């Protein structure tokens, strides 16, 4: 009983994390829509205000990197799904483990290199040309997204170890 | 050799495509003289691109059109226009897929949207489920061949050619594909339907509606009702070709327009709008992850001068561009069987386009060959996304579709040969 409790909490935390990822990605999409639409209005009406198109480009970072974590949770990454057709459950579990291990290496390398890249940007104080937004704003989503991928991958390994099924795409 | 084996093994195990190609680079960091620090820089720089914003925005527009009922309106108009021909629902599926392609630029989105509306009506009108699934999967190719097109946006961004020109170049091959699909349907409908006719008794029970027998006033009302939806492809394509919008801006305008008419028409509630955004975000994220992370592999290949190597290797085999294109077609058909469209475009575009240019092949013409080739792969297992989505959307057994898919695959290859060896089919716009 005492051992089961932390695992349930862990999966609950993973669900909450997924909820946060969904909110970030949907917001990023909305920002893209409004920013590019805004840039059309500014250009065609020759308005003397800041062109908001660059905010759309900034929103690509959360959509991609946090979106990578979201796809890890829902199992919607683009992959060759030949192994899913395997009849043997043991083969499918082995493949899930191999995928999880590959994801651990990938996410760890990017978390590490992304963190150093982010720190470099913090030190340089570099800003984007049009809006003057600090470059750290989009860049922080790279290590953040990779940490989220890593979390989902650890959860997947725990699911494998405890004989649970992989997560499937939900509510979309 | 080890790298190639690792790549194939990881892909077959089901490791995400983006992760596989990144791991290959990580495994060869020293051999390819790549600094660790450039990994995040290349990824971030690649996705920070204004043209690429078109991808999530077109996906959002398509999702709004689909869930907001606008696709159903378009389908109803197609029904009205094509209702007089024999076995009209198959033609309607093809025409509606073309219209959907003129909005979303995605094959899989087109298959899902049209299968969910026209597919159901076809089943109700007596078409065999396997044929419905096969036609749905094949017509989905129009999602990319009719501009705008997400793979062409990718090709244009990565190879450095005009996306607007690419859209113009794909228009005529797209129309040819529509014509040949309709011709196949004319022949096939005689075989698959009892007496070569649809079971009209079932018409109107689901899907587009009983327009076939409608009066002129009803038809007028149908067109009027669908006018906002019909205006969307005009807005997108007209805006791009008149030079009023860039493709990215057209995608945003389409998204805002679709959002406005679905909210104004109260065809979407707030809760459903959340689902629309989530679904579009999931699809967009899956594509953007591939774009961002495979860029490192592409950069490594360029640094290793692999495109030049491919060109040199091809030149040792033949100096004839016709034979070169034949080899490329064979290679790309094979790749299309195993790789997702966007990933394959991103990986093969920068590798093969420089070689093609050395043979004097126009990069715009080559883009249409490449994308058509890879798109045909959506019909060929093991990675036949259109076939799987059509089977799921129409609730059709997968195996029942294969006996009909061969016909569509055959005509697709015939159109591919035409596109390959008649450059004017793609470069027609230069003659005006």
Image (cartoon, helix red, strand yellow):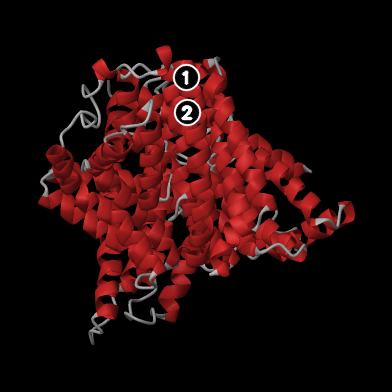
Q: Position of residue B9 (x, y in %)?
A: 66, 35
Q: Is residue B182 above or below residue A43?
A: above
- Badge 2 element: helix
Q: Which mark is residue B407?
A: none
**Chain containing the residue with disc 1:** B
A64 lies left or right of B261:
right
**Chain containing the residue with disc 2:** B
Taking depth in this image into account, of B303 and B64 the one nearest to the observer is B64
The residue that mark 2 highlights is: B186
The crowding category of the residue bearing disc 1, from other C-alpha atoms within 10 Å (few below 14, some 14 to 19, many at least 20), is some
Residue in the picture at 58% in, 57% down: B426
Residue in the picture at 54% in, 15% down: A87
Q: Which mark is residue B190?
A: 1
Taking depth in this image into account, of B331 and A159 the one nearest to the observer is B331
B197 lies left or right of A102:
left
For the residues labelled 1 and 2, the Cα–Cα distance comes to 7 Å
The crowding category of the residue bearing disc 2, from other C-alpha atoms within 10 Å (few below 14, some 14 to 19, many at least 20), is some
Task: Determine if marks 1 and 2 fall on one subunit.
Answer: yes
Please indicate, yes or no, whether residue B251 appears anywhere in the rendered image: no
Q: Is residue A148 above or below residue A116?
A: above
Please indicate, yes or no, whether residue A163 appears anywhere in the rendered image: yes
Cβ atoms at labels 1 and 2 below 8 Å apart: yes
> Among all residues in the image, which is located at the extreme right?
B316
Q: Position of residue B140 (x, y in %)?
A: 45, 38
Residue in the picture at 50% in, 21% down: B401
B209 lies left or right of B379:
left
Q: Is residue B41 above or below residue B184?
A: below
Q: Position of residue B112 (x, y in %)?
A: 37, 35
Considering the image in quadrants, where does the N terminus of chain B appear? top right
Residue in the picture at 13% in, 46% down: B270
């Amino acid at each position: 009983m005492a051992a089961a409790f932390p695992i349930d909490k862990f999966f609950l935390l993973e669900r909450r994390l997924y909820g946060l990822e969904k909110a970030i990605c949907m917001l990023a999409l909305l920002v893209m829509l409004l920013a590019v639409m805004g840039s059309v209005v500014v250009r065609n009406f020759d308005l003397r205000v800041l062109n908001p198109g660059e905010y759309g480009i900034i929103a690509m970072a959360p959509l991609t990197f946090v979106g990578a974590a979201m796809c890890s949770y829902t199992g919607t990454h683009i992959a060759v799904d030949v192994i899913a057709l395997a009849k043997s459950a043991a083969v499918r579990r082995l493949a899930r483990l191999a995928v999880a291990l590959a994801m651990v290496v990938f996410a760890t390398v990017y978390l590490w290199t992304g963190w150093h890249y982010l720190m470099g940007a913090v030190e340089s104080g570099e800003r984007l040309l049009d809006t003057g937004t600090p470059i750290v704003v989009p860049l922080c989503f790279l290590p953040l997204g990779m940490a989220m991928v890593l979390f989902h991958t650890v959860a997947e390994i725990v699911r494998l170890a405890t004989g649970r099924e992989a997560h499937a795409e939900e509510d979309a | 050799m080890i790298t190639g084996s690792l790549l194939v093994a990881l892909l077959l195990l089901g490791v995400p495509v983006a992760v596989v190609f990144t791991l290959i680079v990580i495994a060869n960091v020293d051999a390819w003289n790549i600094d660790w620090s450039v990994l995040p820089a290349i990824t971030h720089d690649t996705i920070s691109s204004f043209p690429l914003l078109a991808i999530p925005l077109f996906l959002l527009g398509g999702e709004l059109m689909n869930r907001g009922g606008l696709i159903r309106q378009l389908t109803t108009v197609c029904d009205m226009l094509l209702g007089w021909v024999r076995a009209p629902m198959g033609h309607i599926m093809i025409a509606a897929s073309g219209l959907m392609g003129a909005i979303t630029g995605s094959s899989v989105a087109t298959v899902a949207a049209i299968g969910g509306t026209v597919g159901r009506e076809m089943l109700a009108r007596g078409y065999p489920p396997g044929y419905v699934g096969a036609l749905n999967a094949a017509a989905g190719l129009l999602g990319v061949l009719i501009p705008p097109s997400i793979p062409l946006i990718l090709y244009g961004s990565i190879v450095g050619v005009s996306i607007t020109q690419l859209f113009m170049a794909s228009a005529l091959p797209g129309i040819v594909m529509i014509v040949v699909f309709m011709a196949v349907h004319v022949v096939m409908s005689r075989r698959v339907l009892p007496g070569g006719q649809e079971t009209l008794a079932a018409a109107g029970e689901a899907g587009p509606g009983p327009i076939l027998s409608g009066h002129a006033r009803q038809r007028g009302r149908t067109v009027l009702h669908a006018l906002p939806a019909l205006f969307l492809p005009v807005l997108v394509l007209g805006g791009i070709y008149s030079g009023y919008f860039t493709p990215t801006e057209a995608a945003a305008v389409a998204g805002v327009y679709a959002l406005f008419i679905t909210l104004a028409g109260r065809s979407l509630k707030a809760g459903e709008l959340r689902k629309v955004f989530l679904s579009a975000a999931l699809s967009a994220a899956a594509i953007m992850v591939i774009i961002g992370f495979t860029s490192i592999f592409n950069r490594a290949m360029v640094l290793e001068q692999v495109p030049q190597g491919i060109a040199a290797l091809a030149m040792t085999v033949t100096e004839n561009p016709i034979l070169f294109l034949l080899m490329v077609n064979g290679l790309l058909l094979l790749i299309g069987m195993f790789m997702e469209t966007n990933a394959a475009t991103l990986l093969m575009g920068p590798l093969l386009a420089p070689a093609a240019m050395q043979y004097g092949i126009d990069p715009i013409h080559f883009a249409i060959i490449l994308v058509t080739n890879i798109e045909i792969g959506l019909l060929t297992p093991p990675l036949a996304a259109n076939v799987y989505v059509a089977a799921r959307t129409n609730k059709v057994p997968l195996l029942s579709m294969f006996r009909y898919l061969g016909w569509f695959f055959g005509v697709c290859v015939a159109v591919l040969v035409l596109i390959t060896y008649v450059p004017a089919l793609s470069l027609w716009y230069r003659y005006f």
